[in-house]
C-alpha cells in the first residue's frame, strides 16, 4: 500500500462544481483495510501538537498573529514517512494532520485572551488548571458545533467554496515523493531560524528591534515631532511576512503608519499646548515619548477600529449565519423525529448526532460548573450569573461558528480578533448590567471570551480538515475524535507557555520585567474589559474615532480588520511583515517562467514556514532557559549588543537573512512547482 501512494490521484471533479446527478468519489472511497488511526500516526501527531503549540504561542504573544501549522505539519509528516521502515499511508498522514494541527487552533483561541489574566492582575484568582480548562472546553465545543454543518460545507457547497489552504494541503499530501525533499528544505530553514533568533534573544548578539530613536542624526524627529520608525529583526517575523503576502501586509502597515506618523505626531503637537495631564495618564503629553503616546492614547483608536471591523464582518456574514443555523435546526429536527439515518459509508460517518447532543450537554455542564464554583464562587446570585453566562457563551459560539468556517473556506482567514472583541464588549456590558463588576466581572468576561475565541478558532480550522477528509476519503468521525483528544494535549502545552512567559518575561512593563512579551491581542482584550468593568472612565471618544476610521476604510474596499490591527499593533511588529512580503514578491517576479515562479513560490513558502517555526522555538527555549536561570539564581551570559552598535548589526543581519531567503528560494527546480502554489 505504501509504495502505491504516490500513484494515487485526485478525481477530475475534486475542485469544480458537480453536474446534476454527478457525485464525488474520494481517493479512498470506502476502503476499510487502509491504515488510518495507528500508533505511529497518533504518536507523531501528538509530537507535532506539542512542538507547534509552543511555537505558535510564542508568535502570537510576540506579534499578535496566529501561524498556520497545518502546511508544515503535512510536509514533515511526509518527510518522516520517507525515513521510516514503512511509508505512511495517505490517511495516516491525514490523522497526523488532524492531531498536530490542533496546536494552531488552540493557540489562536487561548493566547489571544488568557494572558489578559496577568495583564489585569488577576493571576491570584486562577491556576494552571483554570487556564487550561478554558481552551480545552472551547475547542471541544467548536468541534461539536461544527459537526451538524459538515455536510453543508464540504458536500453541498462542493466546488463553490475554494478552500485555498485545504487545496494546498491536499496537494502536498498527494505528492508524497516530493514531500521528502520539501521536508529537508523546511527542517534546514527551521535550524537557521532557530540559530538566528537564539543568538539575538538569548545572547544579545544584536538588538532584535532596529529603531530610529537610537540614531543621533534623527533626534529631531524622535523628540520634537515624535515620529519613530522601528522594525523587528527576528527570523520568525520575516517568515510570517513572506507567507502573508504584499496586499495584506501593506494594509496592516498602512494602519501602523497612520498611527505612528500621523496620529502620534498630532497628539504630541496638541499636547504641547496643554499644560496638564490628559485623561487617566498622570504625566502631561509633553513628557511622553512617541512610544508612550501610542500606548496611552493612539492604541485605543486601534481597539475601536477592531471592534467596528468585527461588527462589519458579522453584518456581511449574517446570511451565512442564518442559512447555517437553519441547516443545523433541520438536522436536529430530523434526529428528534427519528428521520435522520446514520450514514453507513465510512467516508460520510460523523459522531452520531445523539452523541453530539449528549457531549454538548456534558461540555455545557462543565462550563457551568467552572463558572459557578470557580469564577463566581461566593458571589451573590452566583447560580443565576453562571447560567446566564453559559447561555451567552453557547449562543455566541453557535452563531459565530458558521461565520468562522465560511471565512476559512473562502479566504483561509477568519476574523477571530474582531469577533472575540465583540464578544467581550457584549459580555462585559451584559454582566455589568447584572451588577457584576470589579475583578470578578473582568475574570468572568475574559473566560467567556476565552471559550468563544477557542471555539471559533476550532471551527475555522476544522472545516479545512473536513474538506481534506472529503477529498481524500478519511473518516470524518475519526478526525472529530482526534481533534477532541488532541485539544487536551495542546491546551496543556499552550497553558504552560503562557505561564512560562508570565514568569520570565511578563506581559506588562515593570521593574521585574523591563521588556515584557507584547501580547498585543490579550492587551487589547484587557483594555476593553477594564474600560467597562472598572470605575475608570473608558476612552469612548478614542474608540469612536477608531470605529469611524474602520468604517471609512471598509467603504474604500480595504480590509477594515487588517487596517485596524495595524493601527493597534506596535510598528516594529508590522514593518518586518511588509518587508518579508516584499521579499516574496521579489522572488516571484524575477522568475523567468511561470513554472519557475510556482517552484520558487512553493520553496520560498517552505523556507518561510521553517523560519517561523525555528524562530518561535528559539523564543520558547529562551524563555525556558531564563526560567531555569532565575530558579537557580544564575545569570545567562550575553554579548550585550543592545545599544547603537547592536541596533545597526541587527538591521544588517536581518538584511543578510532576507538575502539568504531570496537565494535559497531562487534555487527551486521546476518540478517543485508541480501543483498549485501553496502561499496563502
Image (tube, helix red, strand yellow):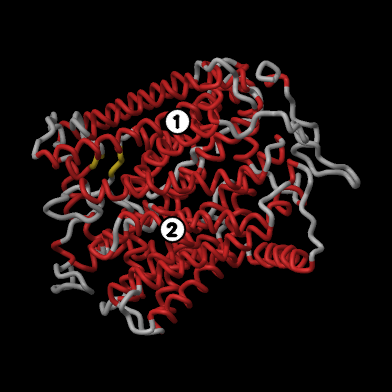
Residue corresponding to mark 1: 608
Q: Quadrant of residue 287?
A: bottom left
- Are the residues flagged by discs 2 and 1 in contact, CB closer than 8 Å? no
Residue corresponding to mark 2: 564
Q: Nearer the viewer, residue 464 or 519?
A: 464
Query: In the rendered image, which quarter contains the N terminus?
Result: top right
Separation of marks 2 and 1 at Cα, in angstroms: 25 Å
Residue 159: x and y in percent read: 76, 44
Q: Residue at image x 28%, y 34%?
A: 621
Indicate left or right for 96 with 276 as reference: right
- Assign a secondary structure to mark 1: helix
Q: Residue at image x 59%, y 30%?
A: 93
Q: Quadrant of residue 201?
A: top left
Q: Nearer the viewer, residue 344 or 19?
A: 344
Q: Is residue 604 visible?
A: yes
Depicted 78 relative to depicted 375: above or below = above
Indicate left or right for 418 with 148 as reference: left
Amino acid at each position: 500500500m505504501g509504495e502505491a501512494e504516490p500513484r494515487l490521484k485526485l478525481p477530475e471533479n475534486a475542485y469544480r462544481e458537480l453536474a446534476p446527478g454527478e457525485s464525488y468519489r474520494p481517493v479512498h472511497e470506502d476502503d476499510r483495510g487502509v491504515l488510518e488511526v495507528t500508533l505511529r500516526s497518533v504518536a507523531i501527531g501528538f509530537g507535532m501538537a506539542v512542538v507547534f503549540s509552543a511555537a505558535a504561542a510564542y508568535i502570537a504573544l510576540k506579534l499578535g498573529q496566529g501561524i498556520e501549522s497545518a502546511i508544515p505539519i503535512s510536509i514533515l509528516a511526509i518527510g518522516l514517512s520517507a525515513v521510516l521502515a514503512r511509508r505512511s499511508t495517505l490517511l495516516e498522514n491525514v490523522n497526523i494532520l488532524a492531531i498536530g494541527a490542533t496546536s494552531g487552533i488552540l493557540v489562536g483561541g487561548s493566547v489571544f485572551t488568557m494572558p489578559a489574566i496577568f495583564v489585569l492582575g488577576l493571576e491570584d484568582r486562577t491556576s494552571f488548571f483554570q487556564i487550561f480548562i478554558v481552551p480545552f472546553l472551547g475547542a471541544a465545543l467548536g468541534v461539536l458545533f461544527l459537526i451538524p454543518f459538515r455536510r453543508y460545507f464540504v458536500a453541498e457547497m462542493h466546488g463553490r467554496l475554494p478552500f485555498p489552504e485545504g487545496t494546498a494541503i491536499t496537494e502536498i499530501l498527494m505528492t508524497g515523493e516530493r514531500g521528502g525533499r520539501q521536508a529537508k528544505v523546511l527542517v534546514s530553514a527551521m535550524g537557521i531560524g532557530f540559530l538566528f533568533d537564539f543568538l539575538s534573544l538569548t545572547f544579545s548578539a544584536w538588538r532584535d528591534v532596529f529603531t530610529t530613536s537610537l540614531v543621533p542624526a534623527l533626534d529631531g524627529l524622535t523628540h520634537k515631532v515624535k515620529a519613530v520608525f522601528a522594525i523587528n529583526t527576528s527570523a520568525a517575523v520575516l517568515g510570517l511576512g513572506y507567507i502573508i503576502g504584499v496586499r495584506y501586509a501593506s494594509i496592516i502597515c498602512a494602519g501602523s503608519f497612520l498611527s505612528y506618523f500621523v496620529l502620534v505626531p498630532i497628539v504630541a503637537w496638541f499636547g504641547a499646548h496643554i499644560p496638564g495631564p490628559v485623561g487617566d495618564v498622570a504625566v502631561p503629553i509633553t513628557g511622553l515619548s512617541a512610544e508612550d503616546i501610542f500606548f496611552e492614547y493612539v492604541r485605543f483608536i486601534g481597539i475601536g477600529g477592531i471592534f467596528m471591523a468585527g461588527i462589519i464582518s458579522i453584518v456581511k456574514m449574517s446570511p451565512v449565519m442564518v442559512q447555517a443555523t437553519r441547516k443545523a435546526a433541520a438536522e436536529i429536527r430530523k434526529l428528534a423525529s427519528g428521520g435522520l439515518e446514520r450514514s453507513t459509508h465510512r467516508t460520510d460517518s460523523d459522531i452520531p448526532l445523539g452523541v453530539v447532543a449528549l457531549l454538548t450537554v456534558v461540555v455545557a455542564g462543565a462550563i457551568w460548573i467552572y463558572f459557578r464554583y470557580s469564577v463566581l464562587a461566593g458571589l451573590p446570585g452566583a447560580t443565576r450569573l453562571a447560567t446566564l453566562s453559559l447561555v451567552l457563551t453557547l449562543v455566541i459560539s453557535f452563531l459565530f461558528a458558521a461565520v468562522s468556517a465560511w471565512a476559512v473556506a473562502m479566504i483561509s482567514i477568519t476574523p477571530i480578533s474582531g469577533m472575540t472583541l465583540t464578544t467581550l464588549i457584549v459580555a462585559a456590558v451584559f454582566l455589568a448590567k447584572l451588577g457584576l463588576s470589579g475583578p470578578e466581572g473582568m475574570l468572568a468576561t475574559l473566560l467567556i471570551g476565552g471559550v468563544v475565541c477557542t471555539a471559533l478558532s476550532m471551527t475555522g480550522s476544522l472545516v479545512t480538515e473536513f474538506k481534506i477528509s472529503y477529498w481524500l476519503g478519511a473518516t470524518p468521525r475519526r478526525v472529530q475524535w482526534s481533534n477532541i483528544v488532541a485539544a487536551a494535549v495542546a491546551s496543556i502545552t499552550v497553558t504552560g507557555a503562557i505561564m512560562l512567559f508570565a514568569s520570565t518575561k511578563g506581559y506588562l512593563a515593570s521593574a521585574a520585567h523591563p521588556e515584557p512579551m507584547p501580547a498585543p491581542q490579550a492587551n487589547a482584550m484587557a483594555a476593553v474589559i477594564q474600560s467597562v468593568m472598572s470605575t475608570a472612565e473608558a476612552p469612548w471618544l478614542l474608540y469612536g474615532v477608531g470605529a469611524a476610521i474602520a468604517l471609512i476604510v471598509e467603504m474604500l474596499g480595504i480590509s477594515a480588520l487588517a487596517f485596524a490591527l495595524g493601527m493597534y499593533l506596535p510598528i516594529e511588529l508590522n514593518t518586518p511583515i511588509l518587508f518579508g512580503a516584499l521579499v516574496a514578491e521579489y522572488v516571484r517576479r524575477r522568475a523567468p517562467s511561470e513554472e519557475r515562479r510556482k517552484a520558487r513560490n512553493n520553496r520560498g513558502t517552505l523556507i518561510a514556514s521553517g523560519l517561523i517555526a525555528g524562530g518561535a522555538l528559539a523564543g520558547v527555549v529562551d524563555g525556558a532557559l531564563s526560567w531555569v536561570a532565575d530558579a537557580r539564581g544564575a545569570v545567562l551570559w550575553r554579548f550585550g549588543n543592545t545599544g547603537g552598535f547592536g541596533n545597526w548589526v541587527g538591521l544588517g543581519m536581518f538584511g543578510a537573512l532576507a538575502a539568504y531567503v531570496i537565494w535559497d528560494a531562487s534555487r527551486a527546480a521546476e518540478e517543485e512547482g508541480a501543483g498549485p502554489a501553496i502561499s496563502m
